[in-house]
Amino acid sequence: MKSAKRFLVIIALASSLCASSLSAQGSRDGWLLVDVRDANGQPLARACVTVVPRDGEIAFSQCNRKGKVKFKGLARGDYRVVVKVEGYEAQKREVKLSAKEETIAFSLQPRKL
């Protein structure tokens, strides 16, 4: 019986810590859709996209064949988005994720030799 009470106390403490951590960070239910195209409006498949929050973990992924990638589970706040693809000038932009869902588009210029 004592072990069951001890288990319930541990669960209650863990839940309390998780809830306070979540409220300190804010809700992580937002998402950011990044659309990457060339100067002619054609999608740039396999572009590397990095999302850097002011605080927290960096996320990165590659665009699909339509030049898009979606980052889910983001907290609202400020981010730096960096886009790179071979043969094109890299771009970075500051983004404020204030709504649950945001879309940002990039138009990359060919790298000058």
Image (cartoon, rainbow, N blue to C red):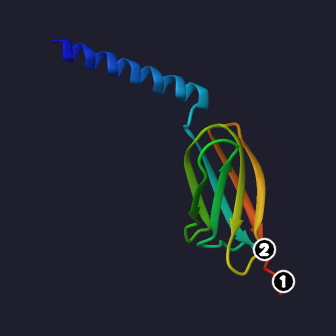
Q: Position of residue 42 (x, y in %)?
A: 69, 74
Answer above or below: position of 112 versus 66: below
Question: Dot 2, crowdedness within 10 Å: few (<14), some or many (≥20)?
Answer: some
Quarter of the image with the N terminus is: top left
Q: Residue at x 59, y 72 (%)?
A: 46
The disc placed on residue 112 is 1
Q: Residue at x 57, y 55 (%)?
A: 70
Q: Is residue 80 left or right of residue 30?
A: right
Q: Secondary structure at mark 2?
A: loop
User: Which one is nearer the viewer's eye here, 108 or 28?
Assistant: 28
Residues under labels 1 and 2: Cα distance?
A: 8 Å
Answer above or below: position of 72 versus 106: above
**Callout 1–callout 2 Cβ contact below 8 Å:** yes
Q: For the residue marked with disc 1, what is the amino acid?
A: Lys
User: Which one is nearer the viewer's eye here, 86 or 6?
Assistant: 6
Q: Secondary structure at mark 1?
A: loop
Answer above or below: position of 37 versus 20: below
Q: Position of residue 24 (x, y in %)?
A: 60, 27
The disc placed on residue 27 is none
Q: Is residue 44 left or right of residue 12?
A: right
Q: Residue at x 53, y 29 (%)?
A: 22
Quarter of the image with the C terminus is: bottom right
Q: For the residue marked with disc 2, what is the amino acid?
A: Glu
The disc placed on residue 89 is 2
Q: Residue at x 70, y 43 (%)?
A: 54
Name the residue at the bottom extreme.
113
Q: Which comes before the other along the chain, label 1 or label 2?
A: 2
Q: Is residue 74 left or right of residue 42?
A: left
